[in-house]
Each structure stands twice: as C-alpha cells, then as structure tokens.
Amino acid sequence: MKLSKPWGVQAKILLVFTAINMLATAAYTLFVYQIKTDTIYEAADARLTAAAHAVARMLPAGYLDQPLNAKPPAQYAEHTRALHQYSQAAGLRYVYAFIEEQGQVRYLADAASDQEIRTDNYGHYLQAYREPPPALVQAFRDGQPHFAEYTDQFGQFRSLFVPGVRPDGLRYVVGADIDIAYLHARGQEALYASLLIGLGIFLLSLLLSWWVARHLTRPVRALLNVTERIAEGDYSARINDHGEDEVAQLAGGLNAMGEAIAQREQAMLQLIYRDELTGLGNRLALDEALTAALATQQPGVLMLVHLDRFRAINDLLGFAAGDLVLQVATSRLSDLWPNDSRVHRLGGNVFALLVTGLPAYDSNTLYRQVFQALEGEPFTLADQHIDLTVTLGIVRFPVHGEQAGLLLRNAEVALYAAKQAHKPWSEYNAEQVGSRREQLSLLGELRRAIEQHEMHVFYQPQVSINRGQLVQAEALVRWRHPERGWVPPSAFIPFAEQTGRIRSLTDWLLNQVAEQVAAWRASGHPLTVSINVAIHDLEDPDFPRRVAAALRRHDALAIDLCLEITEGGLMADPEQARTTLDALHEAGHRLAIDDFGTGYSSLSYLSHLPVNELKIDRSFIMDLNLHNRSIVLSTISLGHALGLKVVAEGVETATQYRELALLGCDVAQGYLIARALPLEEFNSWRVSHDGECDWSTQPDATPALSANADPRLLANGNARLPER
C-alpha cells in the first residue's frame, strides 16, 4: 500500500509512539503504585512494631509481671487513657496487653478514649476477650510475634501481637492495631498519585511524539528500523540527526528516547546485578562472569569467603556495625585486584573471588592473600577491635566443573567441608559430596537409631591436676550403625542441630546420664557428669523443664549433672541464654563454659553469669608456645579471680600436664588420662585409678584403641553433643 500523503505517515508514527508510551507509562505507573503500597504497609508495620515494644515501657515498672488479682489496679483507667493518647500520637487505633489464664485470653491493659470509657466500650482488667483472632492465640502458643488482619467488635484492623513470658511462667502478649480503612485510604492516595504522575509522563511523551511526527518529511523506513531495534532491546541503535530539517529533529528525538531507555535499563541492571550495600557483583553477576570465564577455556579458581561469627557482630554491636564490617571486607578484598571485578558478594557474610588466566595463583597463594587481607589487621568499630576470621571453599575449573552452577555448588560443598573440619580452607573433592549425602541419609535414620538402641554413651575422665584424682567425667555420644559400624559424631550431630532434631538426641542423652549418675550415687560412688548443651536447646525456654523431668524420672540429683555451654551458644541469643542459665543454676546444676577462647565473649561478661567452670579450648593446650602460654595463664588467673574452676581440654602429654600444674590449672581432661570410654571400660578404669595418681610421669597418649572403639572415631574421639 502506498502512502500518498505525508500526514498519513506521521499519523501512523504518532500512533506507534503513543502505544509505546502508553505501555511504558502503564508499567511505570503500576511499578510506582506497588512501591508506594509496599512502603505504606512497611511503615504501618514499623509503627506497630515500635508501639508493641513501647507498651511495656509506658506501663508502670513490673506491671506486666505482677501477680494477677481480681481487683483492677488503682490507676487502670489512667493507664487506659495514657495508652489511648499514645495510640493517637503514633497514628494507631489501639494498643493493649493480654494474658492467657486457664485457657482464656484476658485483658491486662487497653487503650480507650474518654468517650469509650464513659460508654464502657473497652477491655476491663482481666476481662475475657471474646473470640480472640487466631494470630493472637498462635502468639500465645508458639511464643513468636505475628502480624494479622482481622475484624472484631471494635472494628477492622491490621495488628501485631508480640508475646512475652512472666516470671510465673504465664505468657502475655502486647499488641497494637491500625485501622484497615486508614491503610486503604493511603493506598487510594498512592493510586491517585501514581495515576497523576503516569498521566503527566504520558502527556509529555505524547507531546514529544506529536512534535517529532509533525516535523517528519522523509520516508520513515530508517526510523521504523531503529524503532524495531529498540523494541527488541538494542538500545545502541541510532540514526543520523545532522541538519535542521524535520527528519533530523525526529531522529534526534528517537535517539534521545533510545538513550533514556538505555539509561533506565542500565539502572535496572545495576539493581539486578549489583549488591546494594557493597556495590559488588551479586550471585547473578558471578554466574555470568563464571560462564564467560569458562568460555575462554582458561584455567581458573573460584573461592568462597565466609566471614565467621558474623552473627555475633550483628547481635552484639548492631546491624550497622555488621554492614560496616562487610564494607571494610569489600574494600580489603577489592584492593587485592584493583580495577577488576573479581570480587562478588553472594549475600549475608559470604563473598566470592573469581580468578582466571593466572596459573601462578594456586590455592595456597590465594588463601594466604585473602587471610592477610581480612585477618592481618583487626577491624576497628567505635574504638573496639574485632579480630575477624574467615573460612574458604575453593574449586578449580575446568577440573571441578565446566558449568557455572556446578562450580558454585561445589564451592559451597568445599566451604561446608572446611567448616565441618574446623579448617581455615578446603579445596573441593568428589568425596565431600558423598559425605554430605551420607550425612543427610544418617539424619533420616537418627530417630530409628535412638529407638533401636544404636546410640551409646562414652565417658571421659577429668582429674584434679594437684592430686591426679578423678573428680568428674564428660558424657560423649556415639552411634553404632548396624551397617556402617561406628559413625563419627561429626557425621550427624551438626546436621541434627541445624534441622532441630538435636532435641530428641539431647533428651535421650539426658535420660541416659541421669540414670547412670543415680546408679553411681546409690552404690555409694557419686560422680558429677557433664553434658554439652546445643545452641538449639539453650534457646529453648522449655529446656530447664526437660532437664528436671529427666532427673525426676531416674531419681537423680541436679548436683550430679554439669551442663556445658559454648561461647557461641551464649552469643547467639544472650538474653535467652542468661534466662536459661539462671533457671538451671537455681535448680542446683553446675554450669561450665566450654571451648573458652574461641568466641567473642569475655571474662567480664562471664562474671555476670551463674557459671562454675571454665574449660580452656584444646587449641591453646595442644601448642603451649610463649603466646598460648600467656593466654592460658591469664585465663586461669582471671578465672580464679572470678571464683571459677578452670579445666584444660586436650591434654595429651605429660609435658602439657606439668606446664598446666605450674600455671595453676585445676582440672585436666584428654588422652593422657584416658580417651572417651564405654560405661564398662570407664567403670574398670575408675576402679584401677581409685585414689591419687601422678599423671605427670605417665607416657604420652598413643593411638591405641579401646576394645569397643573403631578407627574412624579417633579423629573425633572427644566430639561432644553437639559437635561444632
């Protein structure tokens, strides 16, 4: 079809531009509206969260913990008005507090206006709440905060319920409401604003399109070609815009549109492929970089860098400090290769380094450079020095894979293997994949293993260094699989702790040890036995009750059971850890800090905890050089100053034993005295070593096996529950 009139061509081009502008404007308007709506709800949820945490501070001190009384507090109406005033100031409808008593949800506090108080339209003290929303009931059940939207006799709300626990064990829930109608109104405002912005953009774009089409005087084939290329994503397409005629003007407008779209897409790609905090490439960028590197057929190395104990930094110093650590780590890693894009952040506290075409960069050279960059100089945050440690997982290509996804998975496997083996780095090998699969298989068999009596308790003696006499023992878990034989604890305990199945194993061990210490006491030979507590159990508010139940079941005494907690366990949730330790201490248990010296805690922090013992980590004992000796001496001295008994783990030589005696250490545990022994062998050892013994003259530990042991247990002879 021939176009005989220039106006017909211009009209069609204008129509095309209009359609493009409409689609782009509609997409942009929807995008802006979604962002505004999300922002409204995020702001509302932030207000609800702040209000829920403010309720307890607004009420009198101890109000939520005071004993329940049928008679309301004298200032209940005053509290109700004050909470109402706070609600109005915070842009909320209500704030309140509930308690669950005898299966009923009752008011502890409520917010109400003077009008509502006069009309008796509010929650009275201990008044039952008819038909509480499911989310409120769930908060009482699981002890977790819950957001919810619901309708009751007071209106339709979006609410937050935050539970807490009183000293008498009853749970209370503080909450806050915001009117759904308010959120809907804000949403409508956001919609109108988005439509108005979109309309303005559309009109401006339409005006520009009309102006370009109006000045078009030449055939539009070249222009259409450029338009089609832009529509297909080729934003580099340009047309000659020299001159002052209509074609030049239209070409300039089209070029400007392509440039604007290219800039917007570049900004979007920046968001898609870049980590916002550090500016490094993210996982998608790494995937593309790996694919490109593999296409060159040059050898290379992919290394994952895990910042250890990063959660403790966030918990103790705050997320801002954690962000600063990530930014400093980014700077130090980037300085290794200036003006290069080899460093990526995969999320959280994991970085990735991609090195290609550099044969001289073997694994040893790489990891030394990374360790020097991140561990060579402490991080300084708010005048506080932080010694950061890292763990590395390394793969080579094309040896360990020829696909980006496979290489990244293998690097993650290598990183996991390094962490499991407590090594600073690990290079991938195929056996690591089989090991992870075997661990997953064992995890599925764990419940059956407990029920089928495949688990066994081994005991390792602890002796007084001054007299050489048995003073205590540590209980260690072992698994004798019917097909695999003895399974090392490191093959199943870490997975059990990560998945929450450690609880059943802990309960089993508690019952086994409680039964045994009761039997020893009944025979006239009492002995305290220590058990290592998993982080999962330490964070369980029900753990003290579980321990007490095991003791009652076997008529055992709390004094015969010592509970060991790692520094990592204390730092994971310090408040809950303190609550759990206080409850265990009040029950009469001895408490010990295990593997001291490997975490972020300090003796000044420990002085506020109800602990009795301090166990120095074996890494300081195995190599008592000048540096480690000073660390051990200062730990022993400060431990004694705090009234703590100090236990040295991993004592394997008489030289170490004598050195610890000179340093004033109280108790020794390790292969020099005995390996972990099954019950029968432990009883025999106890009889043969009754009384004092001079361990400083004993021969150093040898790899001799017990009659019931298996060679695979040697590497994990002292593995505890949980394995770390």
Image (spheres, grey):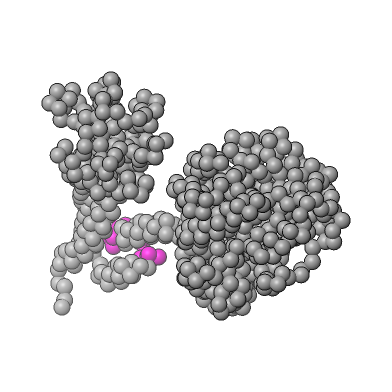
* Residue 14 position within the rendered picture, expressed as x and y whole percent measured from the top left: 20, 62
Residue 196 vs residue 527, the one in the foreground: 527
The region drawn magenta spans 235-250
Residue 620 vs residue 532, the one in the foreground: 532
Kindly identify the residue that appears in the image at 61 percent across and 68 percent down.
Answer: 488
Residue 5 vs residue 185, the one in the foreground: 185
Kindly identify the residue that appears in the image at 63 percent across and 46 percent down.
Answer: 593
* Image quarter of residue 125: top left
* Residue 615 position within the rendered picture, expressed as x and y whole percent measured from the top left: 68, 48
Q: In this view, does 142 lie to the left or right of 87?
A: right
Figure disc tally: 0
Task: List the single residue furthest toward the right.
Answer: 697
Q: Is residue 365 left or right of residue 399?
A: right
Is residue 524 shown in magenta? Answer: no
Residue 658 vs residue 413, the one in the foreground: 658
Residue 388 visible (yes or no): no
- The secondary structure making up most of the magenta span is loop
* Residue 51 position within the rendered picture, expressed as x and y whole percent measured from the top left: 33, 34
Position of residue 650 relative to residue 642, above or below, is below
Residue 683 visible (yes or no): yes
Q: Is residue 337 left or right of residue 102?
A: right
Position of residue 42 relative to residue 699, above or below, is above
Task: List the single residue furthest toward the front.
Answer: 523
Screen quadrant of the C terminus: bottom right
Screen quadrant of the N terminus: bottom left
Kindly identify the residue that appears in the image at 72 percent across and 37 percent down.
Answer: 640
* Residue 506 position within the rendered picture, expressed as x and y whole percent measured from the top left: 52, 57
* Image quarter of residue 40: top left
Kindly identify the residue that appears in the image at 60 percent across and 76 percent down.
Answer: 485
Is residue 246 shown in magenta? Answer: yes
